Image (cartoon, rainbow, N blue to C red):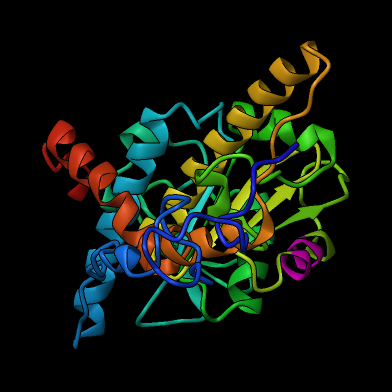
Amino acid sequence: MAPPTAVSPDHITNGDSNPSNIAPHEPGISESKAKVQMPKFPGPPEFTDKHTERDYLKGRLAAAFRIFGKYGFDEGVAGHITVRDPVQPDTFWVNPFGVAFSLIKKSDLIQVDHEGNIIDGGEVRLLNAAAFMIHGAVHKARPDVLCAAHSHSIYGRSFCSLGRKLDMITQDSCSFYNDHVLYESFNGIVLAEKEGKDIAACLGDKKAALLQNHGLLTAGSTIEAAVFWFISLEKCCQAQLTADAAAGGRGHETIKIQDDDAAFTYKTIGTPRAGWFSAKPLFDIIEKECGGDYLQ
């Protein structure tokens, strides 16, 4: 039997005359004691000059590829991350086809319009057609999305073969509570405009999609958030695959987090600001390890 919810009326009141109707960070803590909560997250930098912002975002995008390379999210030439251009919002920057994630520099990135034309960028001006079809559709359908990330990570694509959404079985999975979708179709490599539009439509206003028999797709209002959601979703897939196997081997099921507790947890760790801040250590480390090489 699942444990009682943190808002159950028979919960410990810790001296309060009535139990809290707000789920605290730890079960059994009263609302008054739960007032000491997570600090307010800082936010991404703001810019008054769009060209300065573009230069900064390209550097962050290059760093994002180094992070993906470090995590082993590259496989051959598959995978792409895009960022909307602040100067020309109907275009986006993406990795050139065939350049290793771990070698990408700011100067390598290519700028693409919504017609698939390469209008600026580095020496290697090759565009992954699937990157354009998926990301172009997402950016066009979602003006709020600055960055989108997709790759064929091992646990993500394994979980996507099951044709199901995540169960809320860990605190981390609550970041995706009612904020991810399952795209229940696979028609080969995404080379058709309709397929990209269908994926974007399925994603809707959510931050992540499980592309059946394919892999993970995340979107965010910052590069950092999109990158962190991808890494976190990959680990959530790994955790559920492991937990389901362990539970199934004993004839059991995993214990699911109840909806009200998952919803409360989402409000702390599933917001765009939380995603941006959670990625900060990843970007700090990659800068230290690469010595800023990716900024060239």
- Magenta-colored stretch includes residue 201: yes
In the image, residue 46 sits, relative to residue 48, either above or below, namely above
Q: Quadrant of the N terminus?
A: top right
Identify the image quadrant of residue 101. Answer: top left
Left or right: 135 as drawn, with respect to 199: left
Magenta-highlighted residues: 196-202
Left or right: 155 as drawn, with respect to 295: right
Does residue 132 appear in this view? no
Query: Residue at coordinates 68% horizontally, 59% vertically from top-left?
Result: 259
Identify the image quadrant of residue 245. Answer: top right
Position of residue 29 measured from the top left corner of the image (x, y, whole percent): 40, 56
Query: Residue at coordinates 57% horizontally, 67% vertically from top-left?
Result: 117
Position of residue 111 measured from the top left corner of the image (x, y, whole percent): 44, 65
Query: Who is closer to the viewer here, 159 or 104?
Result: 159
Residue projecting furthest to the top: 249
Position of residue 205 measured from the top left corner of the image (x, y, whole percent): 65, 73
Which secondary structure dominates the residues rendered in magenta? helix
Query: Residue at coordinates 50% horizontally, 63% vertically from top-left?
Result: 23
Query: Residue at coordinates 71% horizontally, 48% vertically from top-left?
Result: 210
Identify the image quadrant of residue 6. Answer: bottom right
Position of residue 279 measured from the top left corner of the image (x, y, whole percent): 32, 50
Left or right: 37 as drawn, with respect to 238: left
